[in-house]
Image: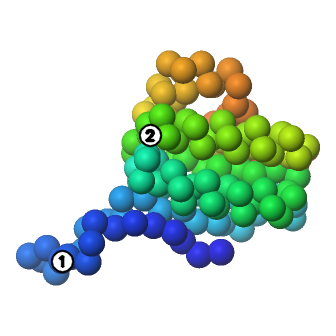
Amino acid sequence: MGETGKSEGARVDGSGIRPPNVYAISERPAPPGVVLLALRGEFDVAAAPAARERLEDARAQRPRGVVLDLAEVTFADSSALRELLRADAGLRADGSLLVIAAVPPVVERLLGLTRASDLLELAPSVEQALDRVTA
């Protein structure tokens, strides 16, 4: 799978550099039966539909588990929380596990304030998340 993202248009600044993507979602290599998705940038209302689509595509593969790497997420809002909870519920209903890895402080705060951290499976690193899914 490739990378999905939204940029702030095709404009180029005075130095000839395009602005970075606001968000990107990419699939990374993972052990058989596991889907590893990495999010980068802002995980908000603009990114939610693409995140939902990628998570649903992952679910359709009927994996043993999905690892969601959030290490490079710079912002998250209630739309992100909704997509995480939706994906977790769907995967659990299928007998699969969602493990959210490398949660940055901005997302950790959101999960803590809403008590979603009590509901979701979190791992400090992608490696530990993969270990949980493959155990």
SS at circle 1: loop
- Type of amino acid under label 1: Val
x, y percent for residue 131: 81, 46
View extreme (bottom): residue:
16
Of residues 78 and 76, the one nearer the viewer is 78
Q: Is residue 89 visible?
A: yes
Which mark identifies residue 12?
A: 1
x, y percent for residue 52: 61, 54
For disc 2, the marked residue is 76
Q: Give the crowd class for mark 2: few <14, some 14-19, many >=20 residues within 10 Å.
A: many
Q: Where is the C terminus found, in terms of image quarters?
A: top right
Residue appearing at x 49%, y 40% in the figure: 79
Residue appearing at x 70%, y 31% in the figure: 120
Q: Give the crowd class for mark 1: few <14, some 14-19, many >=20 residues within 10 Å.
A: few
Residue appearing at x 70%, y 45% in the figure: 87
Residue appearing at x 53%, y 56% in the figure: 49
The mark that comes first in sequence, 1 or 2, is 1
